[in-house]
Image (cartoon, coloured by chain):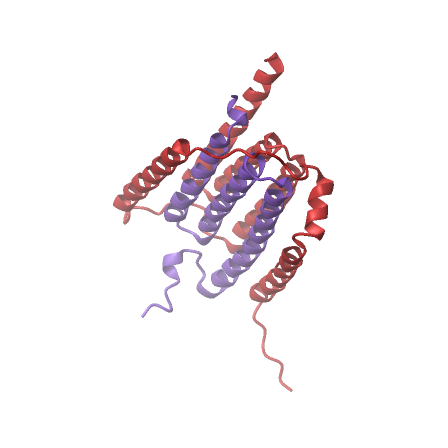
Amino acid sequence: MMPSDSLTTYLIVGVFLLFVGLFGMIRHRSLIGMLISVELILAGAGLNFMAFNRFTAPDPAVGQAFTLFIMGIAAAEAAIVISLVIAVHRRFHSADPQAIDELRG
Amino acid sequence: MSVFHYLAEAVFFGFIVLVFFGGLLTVLARFLMHAVLGLAVAFVGLAGLFFHLGSPFMAMMQILIYVGAVCVMLVFGIMVGQAPTRTEQLGRRGNNQFLAVSTCSLGFVLVTATLVRTRWIAVSERIGDFSLQHLGESFLHQFVLAFELISVVLLVAIIGALIIARKPQETLES
């Protein structure tokens, strides 16, 4: 069986995107960098849905619909976070998460 | 097995290399702009994988929404927010960096080992096909509630983003 016809290949790529995104959330030192890493994780989730849709789902429309939903949620989330970053930058003059500690007790 | 099959496999691995390279560039880049570039590369690779999964429509949507909209919005956010363009101001968390690399690598190896050992049950018979027509019909029959909810969520998110990002103005005095 060719690798492009096996579910495991796609799942490994999805797992790679998940853990690379997690590492990026730890490593990046700005809010936008963390948002980029979350986008990677969501893309990995979408790839998993598409792969399971292709190989194990009886109805091929289900996985595509869910991947479209994930894309919509990711776009909305990116819009909200970008506006939050702009508001935070206006308020604190910084996008470093460690500089925004006004609520810390 | 004709030569075209091997050519298709080569293209498939090219897309996988794009995803891996883009993902690593995204998290390891020193400048945020390079990270967004890596994200775009990874998304183009993912669009190729969607194509291999039998759905050209999803590949097109991936490029339209992610590469076309989300990446442009990220660049906009970086330029407007004037975020620190260098991603690493390390030094105080050198040990944490090593800890993060080892933890994520361990998780990747463990999950990969689990899913390689798992016997996935292949689909026996299908209802419907991969066509766009079937997808649209199921959007309007099966998923109509979720579809409408996503539209409302997008609308609320965009209005909320506008309100949050708006310049604070003086309250109107009556």
- Above-or-below relation of B154 to A41: below
Q: Residue furthest front?
A: B124
Question: Which residue: 59% across, 32% down?
Answer: B53
x and y percentages locating residue A94 in the rendered image: 44, 58
Left or right: B124 in relation to B23? right
Question: Which residue: 51% across, 63% down?
Answer: A87
Left or right: B54 in relation to A24? right
Q: Nearer the viewer, residue B126 or B108?
A: B126
- Above-or-below relation of B17 to A85: above
Q: Residue furthest bottom?
A: B174
Q: Residue furthest left?
A: B95
Q: Quadrant of the C terminus of chain A?
A: bottom left
Q: Which chain is purple?
A: A
Taking the image as drawn, is residue A30 in sight? Answer: yes
Question: Which residue: 28% across, 43% down?
Answer: B99
x and y percentages locating residue A75 in the rendered image: 58, 51
Q: Nearer the viewer, residue B52 or A99?
A: B52
x and y percentages locating residue A51 in the rendered image: 54, 36
x and y percentages locating residue A69 in the rendered image: 60, 50
Taking the image as drawn, is residue B87 in sight? Answer: no
How many discs appear? 0
- Above-or-below relation of B24 to A22: above
- Above-or-below relation of A5 to A38: above
Q: Chain B's shade in the image?
A: red
Left or right: A92 in relation to B10? left
